[in-house]
Amino acid sequence: MPNTELYEHLYNEIAQLVMCHSPSGAEREINECLLDRLAALGIDHWQDDADNIVARIPGTGEGAIAITAHKDEIGGIVKDIEPDGRILVRRLGGSYPWIYGEGVVDFLGDHETLSGILSFGSRHVSHESAQKVQQEGKAVTWETAWVETKRSLSALEQAGIRPGTRMVVGKHRKQPYRLGDYIASYTLDNKASVAILLALAEGINTPAKTIYLVFSAKEEVGAIGALYFSHRNRLDALIALEICPLSAEYPIQANDAPVLLSQDKYGLYDEDLNQQLLQAAQARACPIQQAIISGFGSDASIAMTFGHVPKAACLSFPTHNTHGYEIAHLGAIAHCIDILTQYCNDL
């Protein structure tokens, strides 16, 4: 498939996935989409007790490999609701209010999804107003922000909005934007990796080892889904698909070359497994970068740290503005598909 056609296909695929709300622990929308997609492919799949969606491609021999892409996204969680309908929110995962800015956010109520306006207060104020400090170099925090709903307490209650309700950036603000060969969007972490797993479900044929494609739950709050799965299934290795932060402190270029990690804050990745992935990249003539990063963890490194798997790797795509309005090269995402397809079919 020519790059232009491939990139368009990937863009459209990711755009569909991004529009499925999936804050950690409230992942119903993306679950329904994935179950429909896997059923259409005719692949063996199920939803486990930890809310993972798992697809299984049987191997011709012994052993099993898991490849994960977490399906949850960061956001907020309701702490309290004031008498005038104003909602107080706290972080869910690595979210910051200044990333979203003032604008529409969605609350996934028990009975209905309702929208409100994330608010930081008026700017035409003096030091008598608490929000004045936000104009003088101090970042806005969840504790100093709120959401205006202009709804009554009874209306919010009827919708099932309560302490614990999840909040995400409004759906009408989520539509991705195309920047040439790049895609820009909220929640590329990790909906772009979910798109990679769906492509692998179509492209892997009769591997030597059984392949589990795990659309993992609640990664942003502790890799809970991956830990549950890796604890209950005997695996030879676990490979996580992830974003890779672009920053001056890391020797990573913003291009179509995926990044293979050697270390993150949870520890070392397996060098032998990394060599196998590098060989797969070479066999497909795919460019690849290597790096160690600090403020980061993945399903794979966390599972290996807990002793659930003997080997772990993380294959990622370079991303601007991680945990914000992210930007990634569609070619890097496509090359992740190529590398993992080659690796799995050559097991």
Image (spheres, rainbow, N blue to C red):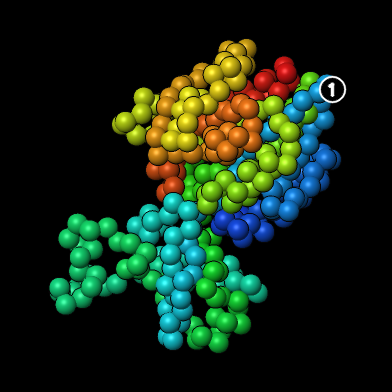
Identify the residue at image location x=48%, y=58%: 92
Q: Along the horizontal axis of the image, is 134 left or right of 153?
A: left
| 250 on left or right of 213 | left
Q: Crowding at label 1, few (<14), some or many (≥20) Cα neighbours within 10 Å?
A: few
Residue 204 in sight here: yes
Percent position of residue 185, x then y? 48, 47
Type of amino acid under label 1: Thr
Q: Is mark 1 on a helix, strand or loop?
A: loop
Q: Where is residue 80 in the image (x, y as percent from the top left)?
A: 46, 76
- Please tell me which residue lies in front, 51 or 40: 51
Q: Residue at x 49, y 70 (%)?
A: 78
Q: Where is residue 88 in the image (x, y as percent from the top left)?
A: 42, 72
Residue on which the image places disc 1: 60
Image label count: 1
Residue plotted at (33% across, 62% down): 141
Q: Is residue 277 visible?
A: no
| Residue depicted at x 61% and y 26% | 311
Q: Does 265 appear above or below 281? A: below
Image quarter of residue 138: bottom left
Quadrant of the rendering where the C terminus is positioned: top right
Task: Determine whether, in the image, residue 313 is placed left or right of residue 81.
Answer: right
Residue 30: image location, x then y, percent: 65, 53
Please tell me in which quadrant of the rendered image residue 320 appears: top left
In this view, the residue farthest toward the front is 307
Q: Judge by depth and name the residue closer to the eye, 170 or 177.
A: 170
270 to 24, vertically: above or below: above
Quadrant in the picture for the N terminus: top right
View extreme (left): residue: 127
